[in-house]
Amino acid sequence: MKNKIDLITNEIQNFKIEDAVSLEKFRIHFLGSKGIVKELFNDLKSVPNEEKREVGQLLNSLRAVAEEKHIQAKTTIDTLNCDLNQIDLSRTADDLQIGSRHPLMLVRSEIIEIFSRIGYTVSEGPEIEDDWHNFSALNFAPEHPARDMQDTFFIEKGENEMALRTHTSSVQVRVMENSTPPIRTISPGRVYRNEAISARAHCFFHQVEGLYIDKNVSFADLKQTLLYFAKELFGEKAQIRMRPSYFPFTEPSAEVDVSCSICNSKGCNVCKYTGWLEILGCGMVDPAVLEASGIDSKVYSGFAFGMGIERITQLKYKVNDLRLYSENDVRFLKQFTSGI
Ligand code: PHE
């Protein structure tokens, strides 16, 4: 048996593979399902027990020699045979670059994750909205300045007024119209405002707005929810404070600041030496808004909040120019590769 293995090893080494035909012949002859190597493994049964181990090892290396020769010959023949017309000769030899997730999408996913842990669903809606969902159902008076041409990109004026949504509160109106409480949902999405583009303002940006409606929802629930959110996002030490504010669709309304995680509230140029950073607007949903969407305000109450994803990303990653988010500069985007 050992002699036979020697002979076959020689035979393998001397076999001339010159083209695809002889390559296939080689494969069938030595490595095929009825090939010599297989046959030898079958013969192993008749080898006396005390020799089995040694012969078995010899057979394994024989098979390895044959396989190695086959792979090498195949690679050479494939390269010679390849059709030059099918290769892009103008392509650089550089490795392909692997992309990274956009920082805004990283933060968006993180926000969604935080709220989904306390039972919030995700709802989406159209970017082109009618007046009802973007303004009227949300209690904006007909002459409210936010409806002005200065702020809103109108697509159609007049009776069938259509505009690019200025906030994702419009999605929440749609959710209220189409479901019965309890409602617990967040709506992430792109919104548009007619602003001159600068480091601090852009004509489009991204929001996540939240809505919770049930029986007996109170301002304390709102505060606790936002404190939970701030701690999940900025760390256990994060604190929040609320300042009275005004929105047409909430009463009372507040703006929420989070303690500055950059300087640990000691004061720095990002928090303008106040120790606090403004991150969102919120309030108890105005009963008129509930009624406009067909929800009985005597039975239900709720809260809403809304934040800009760019703003949160700016604080988390210390990005100080809004324009960077939409310029597609690889040097900027590459820095987020490891954040996936
Ligand atoms: N819709 C508001 C905005 O776009 C944010 C907000 C949402 C405020 C919900 C309060 C409650 O600025």
Image (spheres, helix red, strand yellow):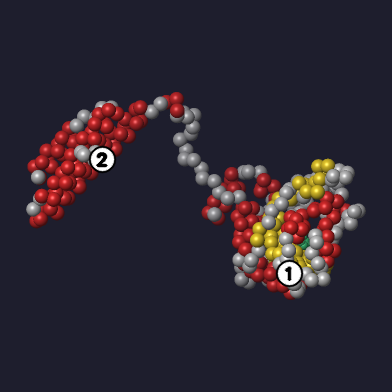
Which residue was labeled with disc 2?
A: 68
Residue in view at x 10 percent, y 50 percent: 47
> Which residue appears at 85% of the width and 53% of the height?
146
Residue 335 appears anywhere in the view = no
Tell me the residue that label 1 is attached to: 214
Where residue 213 sits: x, y (%)? 74, 67
Drawn side of residue 78 relative to residue 45, left or right: right
Earlier residue among tags 1 and 2 = 2
Q: Provide the secondary structure element on which disc 2 rests.
A: helix
Q: Tag 1: residue type? A: Asp
Whole-percent x, y for residue 127 in the image: 73, 48
Label for residue 268?
Answer: none
Q: Residues within 10 Å of mark 1 (few under 14, many from 20)?
A: some
Q: CA distance from mark 1 to mark 2?
A: 70 Å
User: Which corner quadrant of the image does residue 292 belong to?
Assistant: bottom right
Along the line of sight, which residue is nearer the eye, 90 or 276?
A: 90
Dot 2, crowdedness within 10 Å: few (<14), some or many (≥20)? Answer: few
Residue 85, percent from left and from top: 45, 25
Q: Nearer the viewer, residue 226 or 200?
A: 226
Residue at 69% in and 47% down: 323
Q: Where is the N terminus found, in terms of image quarters? A: top left
Q: Could you say which quadrant of the image residue 80 lies in?
A: top left
In what quadrant does ligand 1 lie? bottom right
Observer able to see residue 207: yes
Closer to the camera, 181 or 103? 181
Q: Position of residue 208 (x, y in %)?
A: 70, 58
